[in-house]
Image: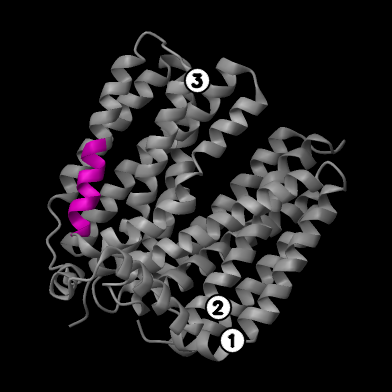
Amino acid sequence: MKNSLWSKNFTIITWGTVISAIGGVGLNFALSVLIYDKTSSTMLTAIFASVSMIPNFVLPLFIGPLIDRFPRRKIIYFSDFLMSTIFFIIAYITRDGFFDYTFYLFVSLLVSINGVIYSITYESFFPELIPEGQIQKGYAVSSLIYPTVNTIMFPIAALIFEQYGVSFIFLIEAILLFIAACFETQIRIDEKSVQHHKSQLTSFKGMIKEGIDYLKSEQGILSVFVFFFFLQMAGQAIDVLLYPFFENSPNLDVKQYALLVSFATAGRMFGGMLHYVSKIKAEKRFMIAAIVYFSLNFLNGSLLFLNYISMLIIQFIIGILSINSYNIRMSAVQSYVPTEKRGRVNGIFHIMTTIGMLIGRLLSGYLGELFDYQYIVLGMNIMSLLAFVFIVLKNRVSIAQVYNRKI
């Protein structure tokens, strides 16, 4: 008898993620707008955004062993209960319009630390909640959550923020996280990674070394991680320079920019639905992933040279390809890595991609002061394309061993 995807555990984690994502979208929007509105400073706004990235550099390396050692189910719901309590307190503090830049920096840092812990725990725990044989469908559902919630909730969050202020957003987030945590306490699963580490009694330092040694021994996974360092770096060029490109183009405006971004979101949603209704044959997964990686670099690199209608079409295709990239990588790597090592491996991936994103963001911003935007985006994607040739194609046999498995 074929297992159904919508088991009790999978349904609970999915609804819990949807509920917390709804509040997260509103909170991220409110904080980004509030800081600039209150300070009228792009520098202070940039510092605020940068502070939220700090935990992503070091924390994943140290949090990975803890995620592998302790029950992930408890980490997830305790994290949501804790942040719910904190947001209730912040909602009370800010009820009369209180604003202090340093206070909000601290809030941003706190949210980011919790976000790192939660995201790595979720990535390491999620494969355990997907019924056997349903992992591609499971990740298809996961990939649909945030684009769908963003599309629906972004305008609603803007309206709530404008009418009721940031304190009400904090209150809503606190309530939603409490509800999500209550759902998550009902997950029932035997976590083998916890039993493994109880029997091994490995030191914290030894666990970190064990995770790094495992990654060194797995050429396929290491190659994928290194390539994604370059892919994420190149991706920041379009993220940083797309809006300035529209602002400085005589035939383009902000409304067209917003529509272009929404086409990418629509593409991601469509791609997620395709992965839900159709399954990729195991022997073709690497071939499709390689085509996707090449196409993402080619299309992103050429995007700013096209007319607006062509840009809309390409953005929709990029959205579909991005979800293909996410789904194939996540379903293959997460099901391949042993559950007792997954937290540490995911932590290392987070550090690598965060560093790549930061370098890409800073480099794109710096070069944007000196050269035409479209040539910067092209150059960054050519660099990523070279990484594809010398990393992915060169190590295609070892990567295919990870990707081309029945999952």
Examine the structure image and report whether residue 176 is included in the region drawn in magenta. Answer: no
Q: Where is residue 140 drawn, in percent x and y?
A: 40, 64
Instruction: Say which residue label 2 marks.
Output: 223
**Crowding at label 3, few (<14), some or many (≥20) Cα neighbours within 10 Å?**
some
In the figure, residue 218 lies in which quadrant? bottom left
Q: Residue pushed farthest top?
A: 96
Mark 2: amino acid: Ser
Q: Quadrant of the C terminus?
A: bottom left
Indicate left or right for 370 with 106 as reference. Answer: right
**Crowding at label 2, few (<14), some or many (≥20) Cα neighbours within 10 Å?**
many
Instruction: Say which residue label 1 marks.
Output: 395
Q: Where is residue 317 drawn, in percent x and y?
A: 63, 62
Which of the pair 307/380 is nearer the observer?
380
Q: What is the magenta range?
A: 71-82
Which of the pair 380/358 is nearer the observer?
358
Do the numbered discs 2 and 1 sit on residues whose CB atoms are within 8 Å? yes
Mark closer to the observer (1, 3): 3
Vertical side of 85 occupied by 145: above or below: below
